[in-house]
């Protein structure tokens, strides 16, 4: 059986206050285009089953444009794959907190062969495929209050599949999921999953395509829609998994180019020298910056140096690119110790690392201090960059 695994579509996502000629936010249009490319590729590959592992929409109440476009594309998908089941679950972004609010994903139940599991853990039996999909949406996992959720395969099915939207914890996840691309996901330990018991485990929430086991994948998002897209340098797309061969293949989809230029240091340079270094960096972008999302971090840049930059040219770059972010960061503050020797003040990230490494006592024996330090420092740096 061949399974197309998509996740984190985030339809309706908006950013940068730029609009298309039709009046649609440019980034919302980018995400919609990526989804259309993904649907076309899935139809071309002709899988036996399509799994959508949550966060179909970016918000609980998406725009009418996003809803209508999503409905059309899922119709295109099911019409292009007659008889092929499409099973989707809700993620944290498209799950209302109140159970009486209703989930927008219920709309897709009106499309033939689409099964939606939005609130409770529920097995979906697919007799034609001799398969069972245990669906675990965000609300069901979050409602457990940190308790382990029972995940048991169906002994009557030949193919047992698990689909969940959350953050997987454990040794493999700690090694491979180096960045937290999205917050708010329910935590699920990999020992509770036991990938060896399943034909395939389809994960959603982490935006970078990652295999945690040969048969357990985060498909990643189809576009860069996380809170800090500079961590998402890898291609976007979806996974096609073959249960007979046990192999997975990642299929990329076209996305808007994102360029995070190498960081510059302004230490010891004049305003003219920094300005020239910035110009060389921007001019060195292959194909130019037109329509791209670009960032350039300039460290150790005093205010007087920033004032001397060619701001007219910077405004031209901002107009040319979809988004151009010149991130000029001031020098680190230094103070003098009682001895009169200059001492550098610790950054917030360094303070967090120092506290967790030496002054904090773990509250539980199974907590890994090194991993907690790594996550704490990463959160602070992400917040500073955002």
Image (spheres, rainbow, N blue to C red):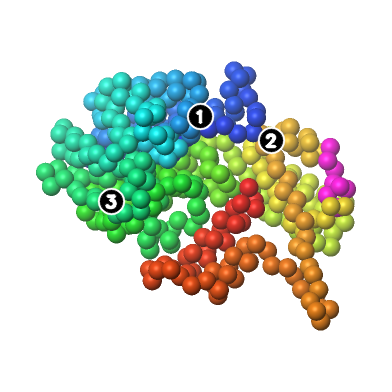
Residue 107 position within the rendered picture, expressed as x and y whole percent measured from the top left: 35, 23
Q: Residue 65, position in %: x, y?
A: 50, 21
Residue at image mark 3: 149
Of tags 3 and 2, the one toward the viewer is 3
For mark 3, give the secondary structure.
loop
Give the left or right position of residue 55, taking residue 152 as reference.
right
- Relative image position of residue 90 (x, y in whole percent): 37, 36
Q: Tell me where residue 212 sits by quadrant.
A: bottom left
Q: Which residue carries the number 1 mark?
A: 12
- Looking at the image, which is closer to me, 367 or 361? 361
For numbered disc 2, what is the local secondary structure? loop
Q: Which residues are magenta?
A: 305-312
* Residue at the spot 30% in from the left edge and 31% down from the top edge: 116
Disc nearer the start of the sequence (2/1): 1
Q: Is residue 88 above or below residue 281?
A: above
Q: Residues within 10 Å of mark 2 (few under 14, many from 20)?
A: some
Image position of 99 (left or right of 112): right
Prevailing secondary structure of the magenta residues: helix
Q: Which residue is mark 2?
A: 321
Residue 309 in magenta?
A: yes
Residue at position x 24%, y 42% in the image: 134
Residue at 83% x, 56% y is 302
Of the two numbered discs 2 and 1 in the rendering, the one whose residue sits closer to the viewer: 1
């Amino acid at each position: 059986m061949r399974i197309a695994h998509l996740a984190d579509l985030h339809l309706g996502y908006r950013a940068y206050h730029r609009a298309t000629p039709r009046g649609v936010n440019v980034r919302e249009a980018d995400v919609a285009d990526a989804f259309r490319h993904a649907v076309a590729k899935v139809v071309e590959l002709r899988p036996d089953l399509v799994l959508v592992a949550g966060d179909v929409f970016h918000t609980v109440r998406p725009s009418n444009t996003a809803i209508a476009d999503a409905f059309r594309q899922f119709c295109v998908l099911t019409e292009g794959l007659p008889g092929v089941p499409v099973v989707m679950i809700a993620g944290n972004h498209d799950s209302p907190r109140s159970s009486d609010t209703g989930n927008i994903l219920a709309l897709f139940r009106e499309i033939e062969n689409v099964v939606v599991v939005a609130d409770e853990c529920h097995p979906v039996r697919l007799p034609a495929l001799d398969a069972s999909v245990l669906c675990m949406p965000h609300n069901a996992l979050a409602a457990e209050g940190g308790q382990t959720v029972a995940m048991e395969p169906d002994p009557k099915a030949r193919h047992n599949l698990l689909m969940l939207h959350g953050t997987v914890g454990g040794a493999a996840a700690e090694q491979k999921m180096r960045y937290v691309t999205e917050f708010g996901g329910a935590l699920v330990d990999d020992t509770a999953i036991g990938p060896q018991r399943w034909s395939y485990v389809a994960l959603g929430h982490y935006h970078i395509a990652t295999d945690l086991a040969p048969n357990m994948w985060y498909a990643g998002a189809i576009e860069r829609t996380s809170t800090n897209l500079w961590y998402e340098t890898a291609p976007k797309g979806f996974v096609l998994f073959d249960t007979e061969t046990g192999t997975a293949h990642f299929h990329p989809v076209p996305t808007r180019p994102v360029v995070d230029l190498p960081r510059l240091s302004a230490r010891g340079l004049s305003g003219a020298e920094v300005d020239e270094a910035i110009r060389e960096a921007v001019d060195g972008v292959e194909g130019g910056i037109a329509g791209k999302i670009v960032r350039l971090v300039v460290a150790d840049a005093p205010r007087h140096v920033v004032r001397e930059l060619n701001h007219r040219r910077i405004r031209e770059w901002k107009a040319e690119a979809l988004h151009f972010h010149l991130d000029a960061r001031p020098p680190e503050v230094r103070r003098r110790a009682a001895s009169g020797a200059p001492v550098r003040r610790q950054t917030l990230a360094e303070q967090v690392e120092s506290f967790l490494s030496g002054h904090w006592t773990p509250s539980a024996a199974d907590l890994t201090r090194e991993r907690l330090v790594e996550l704490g420092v990463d959160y602070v740096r992400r917040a500073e960059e955002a």
